Image (tube, helix red, strand yellow):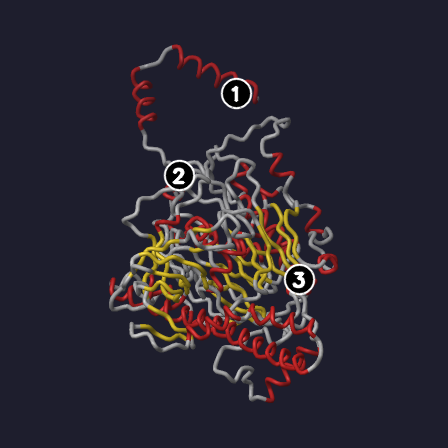
Amino acid sequence: TSSSRRESRNAEKNGNLKHPSSKWSKGRRNKANKSVSRLHHSKNTPDPVRGSPFATVTYSPLSSKKESSDPSSTTGSSSTSKSGQIVYTYGKAQLLKQINWLPSAETSLDQEEPSAKEINVKHYHERGRAAAALIGNRGLSVGLQVSQFANETSKYMFDSSYDRVMILNDRIFENGSAICYRLAQELAAVSTAKTTAASVTTALKNGNGTEGETKVDTEDGLMVGAQMDVEEDFDGGRKMAADWFDGIKVHHVDFPSSEPIRVLGRVIIDAQTETSTTGAGRKAVSRLSIVDFDEQTLRQTRLDLSQLRGPWSLFPGQTVLLEGINPRGSLFTVQRVHHERILTLPRAPYTMERPLTMVIASAPFTARDDLLYERLTGLLHYCATDPPDVLLLCGPFADASCSLYSEVAETFEEYFEKIVGTIMGAVGSARTEVFIVANHDEVTGSFVYPTPPYRVANFYKNLHFLPDPCLFSIEGLEIGVTTVDTVRHLLDGEYCSADAGDKVKRAVGYLFHQASFYPLNPPPEDIPVDVDMLNEFGRLTRVPNIMVCPSSMNRFVREINGCVCINPGFLDCHETDGSGSYARLVVYPPEQTAEVLGAAAATVANGGDSNQQGREPTSATVVQPSPASYIACQIVKS
C-alpha cells in the first residue's frame, strides 16, 4: 500500500542519515559540486513571472522585488487603485462624451479573463481578432516620407569640425533670414499704419475738429520710433561691413557703435567664464556670448543683458537677432531680442472621413528592478479590449542603461524580436496600426541622434517602425514625434528673466521657431547628437497638428501655435508611487466653414499656389478651426 511504501522510504532515509557511509558521503559531495544550469524559469519560478507575456530566460531573477504572500498586504495597492485615473484633459466636453473610453462590454472572452499578470499572447490575439470582427477592418491612410528619415545607410560621426561649423553657420543664415523677414513685415506694418495716420491727420486739419487732431498727433508720436528704425535699416551711409537679410541691415557682432544697431548670430556659453548663479538660484547670464554669422572669422562678443526690459529667454544654440549698442566692440548691451519667425501653421485634416482614435505611450515600459513589463501588459490588455485605430509607442523597450538586460540568456536581437512579437500578438488586429519610434538608448539600436528605425526579421502588415525624430501623417493629420527629452534639456539649458512666462510654451516654441527637433547646442553628454544628420533629418519645417514630446516633466496637453503638444508621461515612471501614464485621444473630422471653402477655391484658381510671393504659405490668411474643436485628449494613469 501507499502507507507502507512511505514508511519504508522514511526508514531508508533515516537509516542513511544515521549511518552514512564513505561512498554515500562522496556521492553527496559530487552532487553538490555538480554544475547546475543558472537559467531561470525552473520549478522555483513564481507563477506571476511564468505567466508574463514578456517572460524571458535569464541568468538572474527577472525581478528583485519580494512579493508578499499575505493577502492583507497593501504593497502596490495604491498604484493599482490609481490605474485609469484621468490626470489631464484637453478638448471640448462634447467630444469626450461622444466616444466610449472604457473597455467594451464583456463577451465570452471576458468572462474567463485571468489576472493581468497571467494574460498570454494567445488570449490577446483572440480578443483583438474578435474586436476587429465586430468593428470591421477599416484601413488608414498613412503618409511617410521615407527619403527624409534617418536609415541604416546614413553615416554618422563622419563630419569634421569644419563641416560642423559650416552646418551651424548655414542654420544661422536660414533661421536669421526667417527672423529678419518677420521683423521686416512688422516694420512695414508700422510704416503703413503711420501713412494711414498721416492721412487721417490731414483730413482732420482740413475740417474743424481739434480734438481729433490732438489724438492723431499723439499716435504720430508713437510712430517716431518705428520711423527711426526704418531709416536706420535702409541707411547705407555706414562704411563698416554689414549685411542685409530681407531688408534688415545687420552688422557684425564686434562692430563698435554707440548708437543702436542690429546683430545676428548664435547664442553660446563662454567657456572661459566661471559658472555662477544669482541670488535667486538662477544661472548667471554673464556667461552668454554671441557668434557672428560670418563663417570665415567666427567673431564672437559677450552679451550684457542688464538693460533688457520685459520677458526674455535665451538658450545655447539659438539663432537670434539682437538690438543694442556696442561702444567698444567687446561687450554688446542688448536692448531687444528677436527670435521668432512667421510659422507655417498646421492645416486641419479636412480629408478625414471618420473619427480617429489613438493611444500614445512612452518608455520605460517596465520597472527599474524587473523585466516583467507589467505596465505594458496592462496597456496591451486595454488596447486588445477596445482596439484603437493607432497605437504609438516611443522607445526604448530595452534600455541599455539597465543592468538586468546583461543577464538575458538570449541575444539582444532575439529578445527585441520577442518583445515586438508579443506586442503585435497582443494587438492581433489589422484595424490597429502600430507605430514604434526608435530611441538611441535601445540595446539593439544605433547610439546616435537622429536614430534610424528598428528592424525585425518578421513582417507585420500593421506595424510601422519610425526613426527618432519623425514627422508623418495619418488621414491628413500631421504628427511629430521625438523620444529625446528635448523639453527638459531646453529648460535646463536656457537663461531667462523672472517674468519669462509659461516654460512649456517657451520650450515647445523653441522647436517651432528654430525649425529643429533639437535646437540645443551643445547637447548634454548623454545625447549623441550628430550635427550633420540632425541638419538633414531633424528639421521641423512646419508646425504639425500633434506634437508628441515625452518628458520627465509633469504631464501636459497644451495648444501651442495651433499644435496640440502632448507629454504622455512614462508608462512606468519609476517614481515612489509607481504611477505611470499614457495618453488617449480622438480626432474628429473638422467642420469646413465658408472661409475655408473660399480659401480652397482661391488656391485652386491660383494653380495650387496659395502664396505668390515665394514664401511658404501660412495659415494666418486662412481661417482654421481651433484644434480643441476636433481634437480631444486625456492622460490616464496606467
Q: Which mark is residue 5?
A: 1
Residue at position x 73%, y 57% in the image: 93
- Residue at 34% over, 59% down: 290
Q: In the rendered structure, which amino acid carries the disc numbered 1?
A: Arg
Q: What residue sits right under mark 2 in the picture?
A: 39
Q: CA distance from mark 1 to mark 2?
A: 35 Å
Foreground pick, 170 / 176 = 176
The residue that mark 3 highlights is 628
Residue 404 x, y percent position in the rendering: 40, 41
Q: Between disc 1 and disc 2, whose residue precedes? A: 1
Choose the circle earlier in sequence order: 3 or 2.
Answer: 2
- For the C terminus, the image quarter is top right
Q: Which sits in the foreground, 16 or 377?
A: 377
Discs 1/2, front? 2
Element at badge 3?
helix
Q: Residues within 10 Å of mark 2 (few under 14, many from 20)?
A: some
Q: Position of residue 247 (x, y in %)?
A: 42, 77
Which sits in the foreground, 612 or 394? 612
Tell me if residue 281 comes above or below residue 547 in the rendering: above
Looking at numbered disc 2 in the image, what kind of residue is underneath it?
Answer: Leu
Q: Are marks 3 and 1 in contact (CB under 8 Å)?
A: no
